[in-house]
Image (cartoon, rainbow, N blue to C red):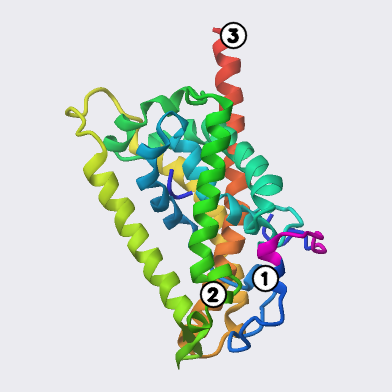
């Protein structure tokens, strides 16, 4: 669930007008000039979206009955969905205060429903046995029991944690803009300039991944000894290949095509990863949803005819 997934057909569009305070600060002329100019929209930064769910772990207990874990996780990745969906939305818009309501909330709600209805039943067979036991309800293709208000609150809270996190780790982040020290260039190596905020970004991403792995290892219940027949390995391999092979190939081609946009080893690596992640994610997300919907429809038709 933490991992989450039309390559060149993503639209670019003009910026929406807004009076959001955060965006006014972002556009102000006081932004430090030390940060390099923006790159084109799709290759401006590498989104390390998978680590963001770590931010909601301390909030599960304080939120009480308003905590819907699935919606919280979706909320933490919702601002970055603008990178991967064919929508004319810039990063500055989806990561803004106004964007919480006109982008993150509706898109997050659609992603939440799509995951549980179409994607989760498809992916549950591919998960390790211990995780399967913890999320056995995914196979039903039903939404978790929760009020709509709780889902909305969880989506918004998750999205807020994402925006706050990014405000410390991106050149256009609110905190980076108002604290010039975070924009200081530390050194350049192999075509890649290391800024303070970049070190925070990479460091927090690494720590977030470690925290999620630790939480999963310690909090998931220890399942009983695996019993019953599992799908044949050949079927699981075929399903994994069906979902991943095409997007992975397109990601590789796109990454190689953009390899020469960077300088030095790190610069070229960054250009490769940026293009590969954007392209792979832009194809993987709608593809997995489509396959999941087709499988779900087939299952329902079989159930009615039985």
Q: Residue furthest top?
A: 306
- Residue 199: image location, x then y, percent: 42, 77
Q: Is residue 50 above or below residue 266?
A: above
Separation of residues labelled 1 and 3 (CA atoms): 59 Å
Name the element at disc 3: helix
Tell me the crowding category of disc 3: few under 14, some 14 to 19, or many 20 or more residues within 10 angstroms, Cα based: few
- Residue 227: image location, x then y, percent: 22, 24
Given residues 237 and 247, the one toward you in this image is: 247
Mark found first going from the N terminus, 3 or 2:
2
Q: Residue furthest left?
A: 225
Residue receiving disc 1: 25
Q: Is residue 267 magenta?
A: no
Tell me the crowding category of disc 2: few under 14, some 14 to 19, or many 20 or more residues within 10 angstroms, Cα based: many
Residue at the (61%, 16%) spot, across then down: 301
Q: Is residue 179 left or right of residue 297?
A: left
Residue receiving disc 2: 176
Q: Is residue 14 magenta?
A: yes
Q: Is residue 120 above or below residue 248?
A: above
Residue at the (61%, 31%) spot, across then down: 294
Q: State which region is magenta.
A: 13-23
Residue receiving disc 3: 305
């Amino acid at each position: 669930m933490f991992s989450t997934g039309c390559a060149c057909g993503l639209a670019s569009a003009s910026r929406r007008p807004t009076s959001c305070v955060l965006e006014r600060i972002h556009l102000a002329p006081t932004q430090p000039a030390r940060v390099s100019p923006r790159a084109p929209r799709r290759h401006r930064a590498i989104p390390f979206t998978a680590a963001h769910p770590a931010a909601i772990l301390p909030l599960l207990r304080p939120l009480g009955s308003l905590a819907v874990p699935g919606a919280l996780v979706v909320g933490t990745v919702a601002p970055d969905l603008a990178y991967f969906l064919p929508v004319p939305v810039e990063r500055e818009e989806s990561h803004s205060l106004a964007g919480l309501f006109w982008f993150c909330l509706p898109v997050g709600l659609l992603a939440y429903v799509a995951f549980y209805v179409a994607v989760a039943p498809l992916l549950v067979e591919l998960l390790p046995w211990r995780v399967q036991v913890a999320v056995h309800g995914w196979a039903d293709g039903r939404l978790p029991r929760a009020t709509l208000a709780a889902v909305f609150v969880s989506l918004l809270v998750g999205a807020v944690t994402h925006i706050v996190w990014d405000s410390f780790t991106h050149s256009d982040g609110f905190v980076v803009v108002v604290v010039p020290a975070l924009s200081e260039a530390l050194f350049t190596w192999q075509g890649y300039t290391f800024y303070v905020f970049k070190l925070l970004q990479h460091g927090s991403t690494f720590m977030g991944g470690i925290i999620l792995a630790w939480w999963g290892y310690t909090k998931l219940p220890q399942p009983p000894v695996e019993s019953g027949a599992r799908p044949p390995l050949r079927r699981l391999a075929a399903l994994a290949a069906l979902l991943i092979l095409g997007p992975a190939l397109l990601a590789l081609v796109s990454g190689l095509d953009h390899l020469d946009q960077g300088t030095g080893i790190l610069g070229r690596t960054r250009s490769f990863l940026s293009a590969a992640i954007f392209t792979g994610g832009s194809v993987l997300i709608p593809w997995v949803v489509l396959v999941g919907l087709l499988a779900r429809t087939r299952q329902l038709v079989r159930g009615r005819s039985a």
